[in-house]
Image (cartoon, coloured by chain):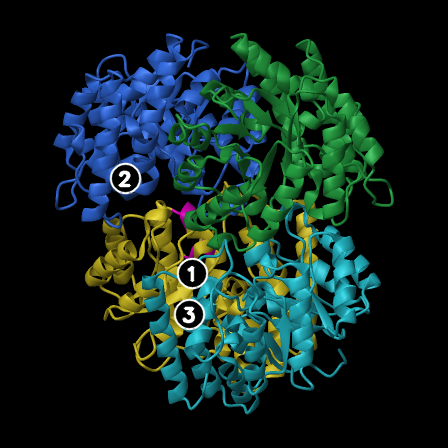
Chain colours: A cyan, B yellow, C blue, D green
Amino acid sequence: MSTKRFTGVLPPMITSFTPDGAVDYAAFIANIEHWNEDDLSGYLVNGSNSETAYLTEYEKLQLLRLTVKHAKTGRLIIAGTGLESLTETIRFTNICAAEGAAYALVLTPCYYDTSMTSAALIDFFTRLADASKIPILLYNVPKFTHVNMKADAVKKLAQHQNIVGMKDSTGDVPQLASFLSITAGQDFEIFVGTVSAWFPALTLGITAGIHATANCAPNACAALQQAFNAQDNDRAIAIYQALLPLNTAVTATYGIAGLKLAADILGYQGGTVRCPLQPLNEGQQQGLRLIVETARQKLLDLEVRP
Amino acid sequence: MSTKRFTGVLPPMITSFTPDGAVDYAAFIANIEHWNEDDLSGYLVNGSNSETAYLTEYEKLQLLRLTVKHAKTGRLIIAGTGLESLTETIRFTNICAAEGAAYALVLTPCYYDTSMTSAALIDFFTRLADASKIPILLYNVPKFTHVNMKADAVKKLAQHQNIVGMKDSTGDVPQLASFLSITAGQDFEIFVGTVSAWFPALTLGITAGIHATANCAPNACAALQQAFNAQDNDRAIAIYQALLPLNTAVTATYGIAGLKLAADILGYQGGTVRCPLQPLNEGQQQGLRLIVETARQKLLDLEVRP
Amino acid sequence: MSTKRFTGVLPPMITSFTPDGAVDYAAFIANIEHWNEDDLSGYLVNGSNSETAYLTEYEKLQLLRLTVKHAKTGRLIIAGTGLESLTETIRFTNICAAEGAAYALVLTPCYYDTSMTSAALIDFFTRLADASKIPILLYNVPKFTHVNMKADAVKKLAQHQNIVGMKDSTGDVPQLASFLSITAGQDFEIFVGTVSAWFPALTLGITAGIHATANCAPNACAALQQAFNAQDNDRAIAIYQALLPLNTAVTATYGIAGLKLAADILGYQGGTVRCPLQPLNEGQQQGLRLIVETARQKLLDLEVRP
Amino acid sequence: MSTKRFTGVLPPMITSFTPDGAVDYAAFIANIEHWNEDDLSGYLVNGSNSETAYLTEYEKLQLLRLTVKHAKTGRLIIAGTGLESLTETIRFTNICAAEGAAYALVLTPCYYDTSMTSAALIDFFTRLADASKIPILLYNVPKFTHVNMKADAVKKLAQHQNIVGMKDSTGDVPQLASFLSITAGQDFEIFVGTVSAWFPALTLGITAGIHATANCAPNACAALQQAFNAQDNDRAIAIYQALLPLNTAVTATYGIAGLKLAADILGYQGGTVRCPLQPLNEGQQQGLRLIVETARQKLLDLEVRP
């Protein structure tokens, strides 16, 4: 990443499955082709919202190859490559590099979460970055990992030439401000990892977001940034407020099954989830539909198509 | 509170004690007289940072009376009046009303924190607001109470004529955005309760803050808002970044004992804490002094006096 | 407390209220008279299950006086006397001493819970014990206080001549074992504060329990201990297993409102709760009734009357 | 597992590494040969304490084969086989079955921990048990997974013919009692997964333990059970109390690096840990050595060799 900031929105792409649980590659391609027409700057393949934990290495590589093949020219391709084991993470990251990923987004190891001190994380990511053939992005998502990177680790790792940024999915805006402050002057890009902090992150000078909600409402995520860039804060806030309940629904309340149903409703290929994740029951589906329709209407009132 | 928004910064005033543990009213008055010269809009007496949990009712009322007597004309006086018992809270709130408090800031009851459902909080605050002679501000501070008010409770309570706002001290910016959205159009003022969210809160349209850090750096808190109002976001963010480590030190890392030492260093009357709170040890004092001096220097570089 | 261990079960007595919210002293007396006929060793007045957080000092003293007056001869009377403020706790403890409490059970201060280090707690309880006219029992209940006393604090405080024991309500059996180990040889009595750990506590050598469930099923709690003392572990475990779901219902699932309804069902005076606590709705009442009846039947099958 | 209960202690075997990070199979074999002489009933290979999260599938299978080859005749061999993906878990479990594992211990999936409802876990484990060629043991370890199986899931799954037990590592004794109660009459064995609950678990009727501490002090773990079986509770409790601080040190305070150093001190092959786990620093080593020596002395005083 150069000193020129990366700008825009990327979806952490959902993975479609056929009813019998196989990856539905055709649906995945259809989504990319749809997103290619949307206001997006790139794609994250094999992130948390991809149900990556339930994918085989073969499936992950197929999804990466298809992303490389079908993504519109000029879009940034980031691959999630983190595994618990350092050796395995290095191995898999370099395979993903060979398959065309521009950057590797690497989860903090987390099984022994209370042992993941700053010293442990600095050791892990330094060794990884030394060995990786593509630049590394740190991935901080305590919601899933129960590990929250501390400022001292971020500060140290930001100085590594092959660590070029991080995705912070906490939604903790003071923490974003703190990470920006300690990495100021470094060639280090902070991606905000949730729409819940998208507008505040922009006001702090962050310019890129990797948003689950961008799977189903990519243009609304982009329109928020466009309004902010046009110095129309009232409009940016209005779009932000319209997106917040939708974001809560497809991340917290209804999880990935909800995100996929929202994608279905809004014109993408969502589909089912892999066991042990469970589909939404009838009541949950109704609850989600109402939230999606309300958000869609609010966005249309703002002349934003989701 | 009228539809015209309240604007500015209030310190949740610390309470000074003499070495033998009595309230040092003279030091308290000296602080108010000092703050009267600072860029502040009002005072909160008997808040969390006042060690209110360790004050007798007599002491609380004395502090309120002295605040009323010594506060500069035109400054808003808010009194913390919350107790676990509804009956006691009503009784004490109305005494504070008689003694000159303009608003009562009322903590969510919290001893049985898992029972403090939205229904319970709606019941409590509705009955209180019905009986209170002054308007009520909800006080949401899960750091101490382990109760985080939910949107449904805030929405319902904001409709009560005698509930005119809330202080949210979570530092959770998406939550602030959500509370703003659900209370839009109501005559309901949201005070942000921590400097850690001050700049993001301003960008969302919040105009008032009750900041622990305003005990020791009131003018810096105010200067941040002035810069924002002057549409100088770079300057506002620079002040915000300078304040963040100080704020972490005097709220999280070193607590009220740290806040008081910072006040001492920066020209106010801090002093000791009441048992069971413990004074800082030598190493902690050194750690804090370094943070305070660093913040002061950064602020002076920005031509801001703390 | 002598080197001879205290033995038996005490209820942390519920407080009855009239429909308009006043303390129903007559019902309280009726309960004591009923409990006087049960297999109990004493009474705790003004504990967590007494809704003490919602009682005035006057009400607390009235309840203590009535307990002293109506308790069967020979039963131990313990009064909850803890407040956040050290000075207030000393003052109120000595009033309770004068009114006839044999021991004071004192909650860890908790409003600033993250500041309640072992040093802070040692300071608080040492000063209290120095000044108290009756022996002190430490009260560890992180469920409500979010403070869990550490072994170093318990070890140090157990050496104080006027601190004679503790109530541990965590249900954490390894912690009970650890506290027993570090206080071995001291004149220090550990009361287990929940039926969920009653049988395991007995096997470790603990001989006394203060159980919420003893408000509604005192004789079953006592029968468990009698079976254990008679070396009939199978019977003790069977009673324990019968009590566990009831205990979960009246502490965790349905709270104090549930405990009071269970008391009503089983022949005591339960009644309503004080605001902000809320009464059970219809569905909750049905759920609880089923649990109570199942427990009663299981106990009757064991020839234990609740 | 037959209706005759399984009895005794199993170590969740540590994995030794050479200084350059490779698995030290020779050291692993040496440990098994040592443990073959100890009072153990079997072995768990590829558990949490094996740093399984950092092992490749090849390494895991090598460790299993060596366990099968070197374990003393008659000892039960359990293999950890859980992965996030159901399909992968089935595949790997059946490979382990072919390689000689008697039982598969399967972790609750946990990456999307808040989605791991009882319905999700019942679905996952039922499908797994349907497809597995060896019996399944549920593995509940919220310390690492942040998922705590609920009674309804355990009750349902215990009825499956190919699910024959569980390892509960919570140390939550009331929960153990509850799980025993709801699975009573089923052919379902509960292994307690921590020495911190070993004595209480025995009193409840549990007869088997899989204890991290059994890596370094296997005979003490066994001696505790022997004393209990001989109805010498005082001796059993004394051994339990001697083991508790050691157990806290090698699980909570110092983690797996501490467990391995304790193994080194007590005559086994511990060695280093794999990145990102970090070795103990000098001060930590000293702290641990003191705890190990104190425990050893206490055990020797009881005529127990660790």
In the picture, the quarter occupied by the C terminus of chain C is top left
- Residue C64 shows in this picture: no
Percent from the top left, x then y, of residue B36? 47, 71
Whether B209 is among the magenta residues is no
The residue tagged 2 is C256
Write down the residue under mark 3. B191
Q: Which residues are magenta?
A: B47-55
Alpha carbon of mark 3 to alpha carbon of mark 2: how far?
A: 34 Å
In the figure, is residue A180 to the left or right of D62? left
Q: Name the one closer to the observer, C27 or A7.
A: A7
**Residue B286 percent coordinates (x, y):** 70, 52
Q: Where is residue B185, by image quadrant?
A: bottom left
Task: Give amino acid for label 3.
Answer: Phe
Which quadrant is the N terminus of chain C positioned in? Answer: top left
Residue B125 appears anywhere in the view: yes
Q: Look at label 1 and name its amino acid.
A: Pro
Q: Residue at image x 52%, y 80%?
A: A218
Q: Residues within 10 Å of mark 1 (few under 14, many from 20)?
A: many
Mark in the foreground, 1 or 2: 1
Which of the labelled discs sits on residue D222, or is there none? none
Do callouts 1 and 3 mark residues in contact (Cβ within 8 Å)?
no
Q: Which residue is mark 1?
A: A279
Mark 3, residues whose alpha carbon is within 10 Å: few (<14), some, or many (≥20)?
many
In the rendered image, residues at marks 1 and 2 fall on the same chain: no
Mark 1 belongs to which subunit? Answer: A
**Closer mark to the observer between disc 3 and disc 2:** 2
The answer to if B49 sits in the magenta stretch is yes
Three-letter amino acid code at disc 2?
Answer: Ile
Q: Residue at x 49, y 18 (%)?
A: C204
